[in-house]
Amino acid sequence: MHHRHNKKKMKIPQVLTAGECGQICWELRNIKHRAMVMLMYDGALRLSEVCNMQVKHVDGKLSQVFIEQSKGAKDRYVPIQPGTLNLLRDYWKKYRPHGFLFWSESQYMVPYASRTLQYLVGKAAVKALHKHVNCHLLRHSRATHLLNAGMSIYDLSTFLGHANIETTTVYLHTATERLRGQLEIYGARVTEQMAAVL
């Protein structure tokens, strides 16, 4: 009975806030794990894209990473924030990776296991937020945050590496929810002002 109650309580949220994503990163004390999750959130990257990232794909001068032939989409460059780049630099100084940026615990020529990263993110989220979270939710949350901040659906589609714009339109429902909230605040005020004049 208690177990069922717990399961219900820890339902997967639709979107995490930027603060919650930060809390998950903070919970990961290991610099390698934190760098992987920070990169995943910042670039709204797929789990496979982070695990298969190579050292040569990080361009510090231009603050971007190169994503090679991901999931039927075209190759793309993804800009990353200074904080993420600094974290990647600190990680690189400590581990000196070559070949894969995040290699497997056993061999540097083997990419980091996606199931391990999925497990670490899940564990950190339960500890920090008491929520069940998977890696895709970080990508989904970041995309939603960018759209809410005013990024166009076309730019978001390019950023996410979607082969088809229709795939990106799933995020529009979130923008509609935001607009509804904005209208409740500002629309009511405008209506009141208009009524005062009439």
Image (cartoon, rainbow, N blue to C red):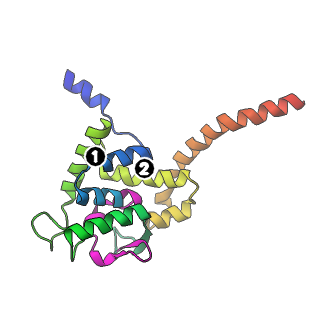
Q: Position of residue 183 (x, y in %)?
A: 66, 38
Q: Position of residue 115 (x, y in %)?
A: 19, 55
What residue appears at the point 44 percent right and 47 percent down from the top-left corner?
A: 18
Please tell me whether residue 171 belongs to the stretch shown in magenta.
Answer: no
Q: Which residue occupies the extreme right position in the image? A: 198
Q: Position of residue 113 (x, y in %)?
A: 18, 61
Q: Which residue occupies the extreme left position in the image? A: 106
Q: Is residue 49 visible?
A: no
Q: Secondary structure at mark 2?
A: helix
Relative vertical location of residue 82 with respect to residue 182 in this rendering, above or below = below
Look at mark 1 in the image and give the residue it sits on.
27
Relative vertical location of residue 38 with respect to residue 2 in this rendering, above or below = below
Left or right: 27, with 86 as reference point? left
- Label 1: how many residues lie within 10 Å, few (<14), some (14-19) or many (20+)? some
Q: Is residue 122 visible?
A: yes
Q: Name the quadrant containing residue 102.
A: bottom left
What residue appears at the point 26 percent right and 24 percent down from the top-left corner?
A: 5
Q: Which callout, 2 or 1, points to the residue nearer the camera?
A: 1
Left or right: 170, with 52 as reference point? right
Q: As rendered, which of 94 and 193 lies closer to the eye?
A: 94
Q: Name the quadrant containing residue 75.
A: bottom left
Look at mark 2 in the image and give the residue it sits on.
141
Q: Quick one: label 2 or label 1, which is nearer the N terminus? A: 1
Which residues make up the magenta segment? 40-67
Residue type at numbered disc 1: Glu
Residue type at numbered disc 2: Ser
Left or right: 159, with 183 as reference point? left
Please tell me whether residue 41 belongs to the stretch shown in magenta.
Answer: yes
Q: Secondary structure at mark 1?
A: helix
Q: The C terminus appears in which quarter of the rendering?
A: top right
Q: As rendered, which of 180 and 166 lies closer to the eye?
A: 180
